[in-house]
Image (cartoon, rainbow, N blue to C red):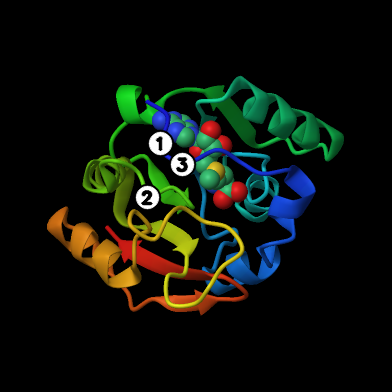
Amino acid sequence: MKVRDSGMPEQTYWESLFNIDGVLDDLQVDPRIHDAVEVGCGYGTFTLSVAARISGTLHSFDIEPEMIAITQARATTSAIPNLQLSLRDVIADGFGLPAGSVDALFLFNILHAENPVGLLRAGAELVRPGGRVLAIHWRSDIPTPRGPDLSIRPRPEQIATWADSVGLRPESSRLLPPWHFGLVLYR
Ligand SMILES: C[S@@+](CC[C@H](N)C(=O)[O-])C[C@H]1O[C@@H](n2cnc3c(N)ncnc32)[C@H](O)[C@@H]1O
């Protein structure tokens, strides 16, 4: 099932809304991460940089064939060898990877899902002990140019409570200018 309100605006506009390296620096996305998983590659906005930073394989999923095709074309152009893209409904079908097999799970702009706790529970199973679930989302405390409706937009404290309920240990949230916040959730 496609996550509600997860359609994308035009690519250039979408990518003008993030400081991609700033987000990844702040979340310490670096070669200490070996294998990782991303839910919803979209245009590959973060995918390509994440793959370039980590030392293992990035498994990235999307439910939309067009998003997989766009991201694959960009990865090919940039000669990124460690990206495994798959067309998959991760809500319905899970990750298809062994439990505890990755260092990090990226949940970027996706936790407004119908069942965020289910997604976090699946993530907690996937990540190895000591590994991290990295979540970012649109802020609710300021007006933002995009983002899901405020009624379904998760706030940092909400994500921390959900995480806690599935055995993930949340760090305090941080601001990721211009429009986002980020949370690191430890397994
Ligand atoms: C709001 S976009 C965010 C994309 C990317 N994470 C980013 O921040 O640039 C959400 C993406 O998740 C994908 N998606 C939605 N439901 C999904 C599902 N059930 N399984 C896999 N991907 C899904 C959408 O197709 C879309 O590309």
Please name the residue shown 36% across and 39% down the image. 101
- Separation (CA) of disc 2 from disc 3: 8 Å
Is residue 60 among what the camera can see? no
Location of the N terminus by quadrant is top left
Q: Quadrant of residue 140?
A: bottom left
Q: 178 and 89: which one is in front?
A: 178
Of all residues shown, which one is farthest toward the right? 77
Q: Earlier in the sequence, mark 2 or mark 3?
A: 3
- Separation (CA) of disc 1 from disc 3: 6 Å
Q: Disc 2, disc 3: CB below 8 Å?
A: yes
**What label sits on residue 112 in the rendered view?**
2
Is 55 on the left or on the right of 36, as rendered?
right
- The amino acid beneath tag 1 is Val
- The amino acid beneath tag 3 is Asp
Answer above or below: position of 65 versus 18: above
Ligand 1 closer than 8 Å to the CB at disc 1? yes
Ligand 1 closer than 8 Å to the CB at disc 3? yes
Q: Which residue is mark 1?
A: 3
Q: Which residue is mark 3?
A: 5
Please name the residue shown 28% across and 69% down the image. 170
Location of the C terminus by quadrant is bottom left
Q: Quadrant of residue 99?
A: top left
Q: Disc 1, disc 3: CB below 8 Å?
A: yes
Please name the residue shown 60% across and 64% down the image. 24
